[in-house]
Amino acid sequence: MFSILSNVLSLNIRIALLFPLIVGFCLATGNGLAQNGKFHIDSLFPSNVSDTLNVKQFSFNDWVNGEEGKYLLNEVHGTHDYHPLYQNSIVRNDLGNLGSADHKVLFSFDRSFGFHFRSSRQGYWKPLERRTFLLSEKMFSNVQYSNGVNRENYLLANFTRGFGKLLNLGFSFNRDVSEGFYAQQRNIFTDMSVFGTFRSKDDRYKAILMFDYSNLRAMENGGIANDTVFESNRTSDRSFVPTNLNESSNHWKGFDLGLEQRFFLMKEDNSTGVRPVRPAISHSFSVAQQSMVYRNIPDTTSDFYENIYFDTTATYDSTTVFSVSNALRFELVKSDSISDRIINRLAVGAQYDYYRVAYDSVFVDGIHNVSVLAKVNGKLFKEIDWNASGNFMVYGYNIWNLKVDGQFDYSVGKSHFSAFVNYSLFRPDYITDNYYSNHFVWDNDWGQTQHLKTGLVYEQSKLRFKGTFTYHILDNLVAYGTDRLPYQSKAVNQLMVFRLQEHFRMRWFHVILDGAFQWKMTGDDIRIPMALGRGMLYYQNDLFKKKLRLQIGAEVSYAMSYYANGYNPALSEFHVQNEKQVGNYPFIDVFVNIRVKKLRAFFKVEHLNAGWLGYTYYHVPHYPVNDLAWKFGVNWAFLD
């Protein structure tokens, strides 16, 4: 044990010495750090332009429950990091310009409670609980448009308007299109949502209704057929590099319709004064459908797919999941005029879920789940905020599933401390249990997976510092093996993740560092780099009487080499592989950001150093990261 600790400490010291030489050792951008922390960077440097827009962003569930929203920012910082999947990967692109499949190098695991069909493409496929909307007393809209090489276009439009103080309506529209660099990389993603909120005059009743629709068409080339062609740079035209699949694609589409509402049974005040506690009833309803179709023309001369089970002329693997959910809760909520107490809100209730799964035209028997739930939050010793929640499945396909979460928050001066612990006991994804298609067929019977996650977070707003420690234990984890088939691990996977974020300012010059060290203590079913990070160095100044804010800088990202998971297009899943290491390559971007009033714009060159250190830049085996590419865009907010 002593020798192991000695080796680990020695390795940590070497990494610490190399840290300043890799300009930034980080994963999230300064933009993500600014918005997710207790402060945002632009507010530290006053100008004639407001850094905060008078419009708030809420999650689908938070607004009804009275949670405070988050103001949108008009900051120039991070304008160049426009892409919605920027946080999913070090360089925003893994399998084409859009990087449509999920690939994360910073380990994060937090499974929501209940039935799961599959977990892939979470970066694009957002259920209602992860949807957000905007509210403003006045009419607000913003348009964001970006354009890049190989006909990459990204458009985002938001609109919200209040009709008096009781009714708000709005929508969000997002479209992302790219041809990619290699053959068969065209991606088209369309996502939209429409919402309406209503509250009564006495604020006893609140409700939100939302409809969303997503559509993703992704060409799948299976990666390049021969890495030597790329690594030797035999052709600068990437479209001529041979790929494994020539006629293969995935088409995902679906919708969600949800209603969240709460009604207080009593008014805030009574004849004798203020009520300390108000009872309420809340109700949630949703209906959703998702369909996933994989098309391919099998190549009997290739061993990319080892098996062809049903049709040797054409693959058409269609999966549809339809669901209906209802939840009813009884709540006791502290009155707004009463100071914080040990328990400010207590909610108990029950939920019923129905699912229907179809493979092609064959329907699986209806899946039913009944669960009980409880949530509580409050304040201890007038200084410590705490909250806890629990869900337990009492009947159905996921019977005996359990999820318990708890967190404590304490603030003193400019410092903020958080401690959390989460425990989940769950049945693995349905697709890993039972699935049949043209290339993959299995019928398994898994045991329940256990996941324990605990950690500490420290933030110091004056020093612009954030440190996070997270510890994971995963037992009976189901993953995809080297044969691309699901298996249940017999090992216990233990991981520790240390992450440090800091923003330094030296007059007009800024350095932002964000690095992570990931230590796998036991198990080898989760593949992640030991160390990774991103850093940013830029010059910022206000010109023309502080009406224009200018930012010029460079960004570097890096991850140590490791056996990254391979990608399987037919399942849209990643699997363990032991043949090729990726990483150990720095990526350099340069950018210019400006802001004039409510208009922000950027120009950037991604992967400026392409080819300088050879052609070994992968993040997924056999899928080279994009070459040098330019991009520009604008973001314009309107508030009437």
Image (tube, rainbow, N blue to C red):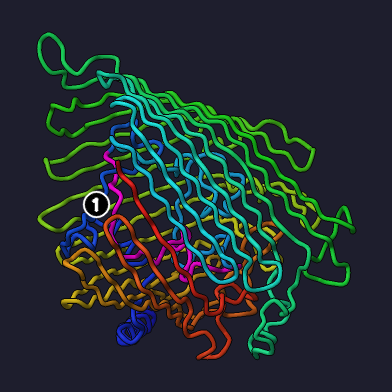
- The residue that mark 1 highlights is 52
Viewer-proximal residue, 22 or 188? 188
Quadrant the N terminus occupies: bottom left
Q: In the image as oriented, which residue stretches furthest toward the front?
A: 544
Image coordinates for residue 131, horizontal then vertical, percent: 45, 43
Residues shaded magenta:
68-96
Image coordinates for residue 201, horizontal then vertical, percent: 27, 19
Say which residue appears at 21% left-offset and 73% top-offset. Answer: 541
Say which residue appears at 20% left-offset and 22% top-offset. Answer: 277
**Residue 456 visible from this viewpoint:** no
Tell whether position 600 is magenta: no
**Residue 15 visible from this viewpoint:** yes
Viewer-proximal residue, 61 or 114? 61
Dividing the picture into quadrants, the one containing residue 234 is: bottom right
Image coordinates for residue 346, horizontal then vertical, percent: 29, 29
Is 207 situated left or right of 299 in this image? left
Dividing the picture into quadrants, the one containing residue 260 is: top left
Taking 559 as reference, is 572 above or below it? above
Taking 181 as reference, is 257 above or below it? above
Task: Say which element carries label 1.
Answer: strand
